[in-house]
Amino acid sequence: MEIAFLTHYGVPPSTLSAATGMARRQGVYADEALLAAGGISESHFYHALARHLRLPFVDGDVQIAATICYPEAIHAGLVPLADRKEADLLAAPRGDAIAHLILSSYRGELQSRLAITCPTHLSRLVRAASRERILHESSFGLASWDPALCTKDMTSPRRSRAISGLAVLLLVAMLTIKSASFFCAMLVSAAFFALV
């Protein structure tokens, strides 16, 4: 159902039939099978969907509202727009959401303040709008997830043991090893094991 409309936009019925069969065998939605198999490009699919629903298609930069939740907004495929000139919401529907939009359109219940885009474009826009949060989570997420895996807040006794162990290993290495490359290897391994 979610891909049948494509016959009106130049996609052969045999391609749609093959995608539907693949979707059944793999337990996925027909649009996912069609796009994954390369039966149609993502851009062509979502341009055709927007035309079919008589909604604007967005492929350029737009301002997403600051209230979005990353990465949930990408998974939902729907975000509010800050600049509400053409639309209030930007959608990159998949699966059941496509079928629901098409049925709503046929019934005349479709919200006209909706714009359509490709999932990859929506993802790019959300990641750009969430840049600061992504950077923060990349830098400090490990300490929040499991502090034992992070040396950021290493307690004093633990830090003292690590530094003492490293100093002893370095002293022994300098006194007993004459080869510079072997000394460097010992230095690296000592630093690793002292901090573990």
Image (tube, rainbow, N blue to C red):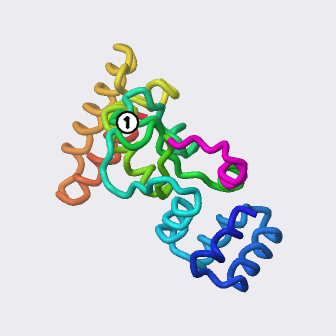
How many residues crowd mark 1 within 10 Å: few (<14), some (14–19), many (20+)? some
Q: Residue at x 22, y 37 (%)?
A: 171
Residue 46 sits above or below residue 176 on the image: below
In the rendered structure, which amino acid carries the disc numbered 1? Arg
Relative height, residue 90 to residue 48 (above, below): above
- Look at the image and give the residue range highlighted in magenta: 101-112
**Horizontal side, residue 40 vs residue 190: left or right:** right
Q: Nearer the viewer, residue 9 or 170?
A: 9
Q: Secondary structure at mark 1?
A: loop
Magenta-colored stretch includes residue 157? no
Asked if residue 87 lies left or right of residue 21, the reply is: left
Which quadrant does the N terminus fall into?
A: bottom right
- The residue pinned by badge 1 equals 84
- Residue at (58% x, 62% y) in the render: 52
Q: Where's residue 53, x and y in %?
A: 58, 56
- Quadrant (top left, top right, bottom left, bottom right) of the C terminus: top left
Q: Quadrant of residue 49?
A: bottom right
Rendering coords of residue 86 (x, y %): 39, 43
Nearer to the camera, 120 or 192: 120
Residue 123: percent from left, percent from top: 44, 50
Residue lying furthest top in this view?
Answer: 156
User: Which residue is more in the foreground, 190 or 25?
Assistant: 25
Residue closer to the observer: 137 or 194:
137
Q: Is residue 108 magenta?
A: yes
Residue most extreme to the front: 108
Question: How many marks on residues?
Answer: 1
